[in-house]
Amino acid sequence: MHPAIRSRPAARRRKGGLRRGGQEMKMGAFIVVHVEVKDPEKFKAYGDSARGTVADHGGEFILRGKVADVLHGEHALKNAVVIRFPDQAAAKGWYDSPEYQALIPNRNEAADMVFISFDEPPAS
């Protein structure tokens, strides 16, 4: 084995996250939201309220935008949001929090939405 490769601490996936040099590293998490707005005024009010709940759980908005093109398959929802959290526990904690759960009736009136959670890929 090449000496430079041997000297690098190995990164291995473990049950709770990634291990590098014997220390566990938490992996980030992303929530991707696909959105079809039904009522722009209600959606703005929902978004204004939801923004603070995301920050309270360590989340940050990475992207908010319109779908430019569907390259393959069918996809009816026209907007997308990507939120990054420190880890899956924070992402789930945000979604399940009483503060966010209280916004869901307004969300459902304002838009059709699909929420998908992803693990952040490990650094290579």
Image: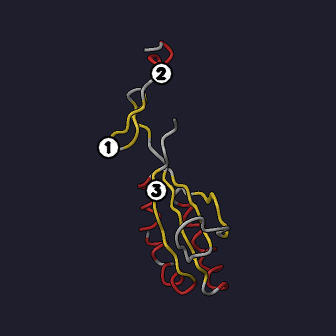
State the mark number for residue 15: 1
CA gap between label 2 and label 3 equals 28 Å
Please name the residue shown 53% across and 80% down the image.
112
Question: Mark 3 = which residue?
Answer: 118
**Residue, disc 2:** 8
Residue drawn at x 51%, y 35% as measured from the top left = 124
Answer few, some or many: residues within 10 Å of disc 1's Cα (few below 14, many 20 plus, some between 14 and 19). Answer: few
Q: Which mark is residue 32?
A: none
Left or right relative to 98: residue 65: right
Choose between 109 and 100: the one closer to the eye: 109
Task: Please say if the residues under marks 1 and 3 sit with CB atoms less than 8 Å apart.
Answer: no
Which amino acid does the dot numbered 2 rest on? Answer: Arg
Q: Amino acid at mark 1?
A: Lys
Q: Position of residue 109 (x, y in %)?
A: 54, 87
Whichever of labels 2 and 3 marks the residue nearer the N terminus, that label is 2
Q: What's the distance in space between the residues labelled 1 and 3, CA to CA?
A: 16 Å
Q: Is residue 84 above or below residue 97?
A: above
